[in-house]
Image (tube, helix red, strand yellow):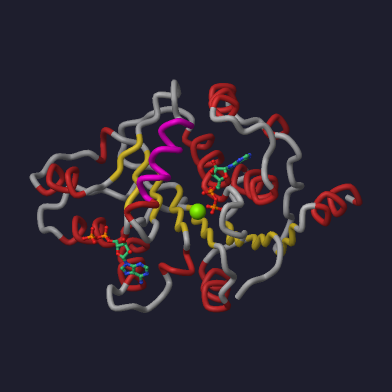
Amino acid sequence: KEKVNRTRKQNSITVSGKNVPAPIESFDDCNILPQVLKNIVKMGYSNPTPIQMQAIPIMMQGRQILACAPTGSGKTMAFLIPVINSLKKPKSDGFRALIVCPTRELARQIFRECTQLTEQTGLRTYLISKLTQKHISKGENISKKCDILITTPNRLVYILRQEDSKMDLKHVEWLIVDESDKLFEVGVRGFRDQLGEIYRACDSENIKRAMFSATHTVHVAKWCKKHLKGMISVGVGHRNT
Ligand code: ADP
Ligand code: ADP
Ligand code: MG
């Protein structure tokens, strides 16, 4: 217990919530699938960053999380590793993980990392882009052929609203909201309402949600406390509001 506190302190990790698992100090510490571990090494990562140390064991236990850590601190791998690990093998039920982020560039970046991390696992990742959106609009049912979906809210909501939409989010076990502070903003483009629609479309009984962002916003924290059962809040470094 003391060691856990020391490790957190040394890495500027703060946590709040019930029964928070101990941070890992190495990627070998928490039953990551051998192939995923191989892929992590191949990508050049030898040790977890502070947010990865704490978020990975939390999500590996299937706990919901609100994570705040500075830009460049490795948040992408902090959610990709536990999500991929929990999906394990490809299935043809429909998407089992959905990652939503505010910009197309970011979506592409996450897609690239996810593709590398799922190498040789058989898991298939789908990125909704201008091009692939056309396939979906024409009625192609991609849901059954892929495991992980990465998208900006606009594009997904557009697809969900189509009358004959074959987009099926009923099997989503993990909903990841990256840069959640931005997606919660009430803006011209109305990300907030779009996120609500996506949230409602993911209506599986055992859905788990994870919010990641660089800044801690009171609004997001309050929302998570109210809606995410058993949620753990993790912060790294200073709280920049
Ligand atoms: P954030 O989302 O927190 O802004 P990213 O996930 O984009 O950060 O990661 C920032 C950079 O750190 C990326 O170039 C990524 O490849 C690298 N990175 C991620 N995890 C590790 C790690 N465990 N060790 C070294 N570099 C890492
Ligand atoms: P489209 O490709 O038609 O523009 P997208 O959903 O892919 O539709 O667009 C996402 C883009 O919208 C991002 O590149 C982002 O810069 C911009 N954007 C819209 N609203 C916001 C917002 N509230 N905060 C940040 N970026 C936003
Ligand atoms: Mg990021």
Nearer to the camera, 60 or 127:
127
Q: Quadrant of ligand 1?
A: top right
Dominant secondary structure of the magenta stretch?
helix
Determine the residue positioned at 32% across, 57% down: 152
With respect to residue 1, does 93 lie above or below?
above
Determine the residue positioned at 53% across, 34% down: 85
With respect to residue 79, does 235 lie above or below?
below
The question of residue 39 being in magenta is answered with no
Q: Residue furthest left?
A: 138
Nearer to the camera, 9 or 19:
9
Image quarter where the C terminus lies is bottom right
Quadrant in the rendering for residue 233: bottom right
Quadrant in the rendering for residue 127: top left
| x and y percentages locating residue 35 in the rendered image | 54, 22
Q: Which residues are magenta?
A: 107-117
| x and y percentages locating residue 50 in the rendered image | 70, 49
Residue 137 lies left or right of residue 84; in this view the side is left
| x and y percentages locating residue 98 in the rendered image | 38, 49
Determine the residue positioned at 48% across, 69% down: 181
| x and y percentages locating residue 217 in the rendered image | 56, 74
Residue 68 lies left or right of residue 90; in this view the side is right
The question of residue 116 being in magenta is answered with yes
With respect to residue 31, does 193 lie above or below?
below
Determine the residue positioned at 34% across, 63% down: 200
Nearer to the camera, 20 or 35:
35
Residue 20 lies left or right of residue 228; in this view the side is right
